[in-house]
Amino acid sequence: VAAHNSTIINSGVPAPFHIDGGWRMPRHEKYESHLRQVMTFVHGRSDTYPKGTIFSRDQLLELKPQHLRDFLAMKAYKKMFFSYEAGDRPIYARSSSLEQVKKGVSFFMPNHEPQWYLGQGNPTKSEVVTKFINSVKLLEKRGEGAPAKAKRAFTAAEFSKQLEMMRRYGRKKNKFDHGVKYIAMCIWQYHTIGRFEHIAHFEMSDLKGHDRFNFALNTKVQWSKNARDEQRCPDQILLGSRVDNNCIIIIMSIYLESHLEMHLDSKYLFTGDRDDKAPDKLKTKFTNRLRAVVWKKEEFNELGDDLNDDE
């Protein structure tokens, strides 16, 4: 009788799952860090396996559900053996983080598809791992887990504070990027309702004057990947604002005058680099500067504290 791609023999023990003899560990940059941490824990190493480490099929087949459960317990509780009655709570990691580890490790398992069954299969798809993660979820619902880190939209006050702090830093350091370009990118994002990765990919040819209203701009929009029809991706009109600090017309006039003076043949709207990786580099730099100059500062975070107090 076939079960989970294995054959049940008379003793009730399944024969080994079939694995391609030419199997090699797949590669996935994002997931490999999870696997390296788990294997470091299982092998009792003091230092984490270095980036690029390739594990053999036999090494990965040695991984058992209890190994994963113990590793996840260390992440959530900082101990493998814990007691609810003794006051232990999973305050060091959210269940969503544990699920990411589970997903990452599962990607590399030679027996990737089958559920764990009688000592074989995919150890991440086992009852012991699933039960542990569900127990952490239950405690989170009771307010006894790690604090949630769910993202939310900026409030109007936070957006204004971001512009204020970035402008102030730009004036203090006499930096064009902080005082003008990053401000333009923030306001552009606001008006186009975009994400950072969308903003970085806008090209100079996307922006143009409106053909009917000389007081407005028109831009091609970096629409969501869910939009599959060009007719569903119309240009977006950009209108000025009575609040000069948030006016897209004013800030783009100031920004483009200087930007085109420095990069007359610019391909992208917000960077003078022309290579294909320029948008990704811009997004990373823009995010890092916002984090350093604004998001990590107490002045900014006090607004979020006030919001929580109101709730």
Image (cartoon, rainbow, N blue to C red):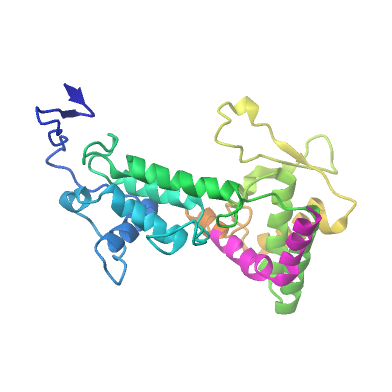
Front-lying residue, 255 or 167? 167
Outermost residue to the front: 85
Residue in the image at 36% along x and 57% along y? 71
Q: Position of residue 8 (x, y in %)?
A: 14, 28
Outermost residue to the right: 242
Q: Is residue 67 left or right of residue 155?
A: left
Q: Is residue 259 above or below residue 2?
A: below
Q: Which secondary structure dominates the residues rendered in magenta?
A: helix
Q: Is residue 214 left or right of residue 257?
A: right
Image quadrant where one finds the N terminus: top left
Front-lying residue, 195 or 8? 8
Residue in the image at 72% along x and 37% along y? 236
Outermost residue to the left: 10
Front-lying residue, 60 or 291? 60
Total number of numbered labels?
A: 0
* Residue 51 visible in the picture: yes
Q: Position of residue 61 (x, y in %)?
A: 20, 48
Quarter of image, res 214: top right
Q: Is residue 302 magenta?
A: yes
Segment tinted magenta in the rendering: 284-311
Residue in the image at 60% along x and 61% along y? 286
Q: Position of residue 4 (x, y in %)?
A: 23, 29
Q: Position of residue 307 (x, y in %)?
A: 77, 57
Q: Is residue 126 left or right of residue 154?
A: left
Outermost residue to the top: 1
* Residue 159 visible in the picture: no
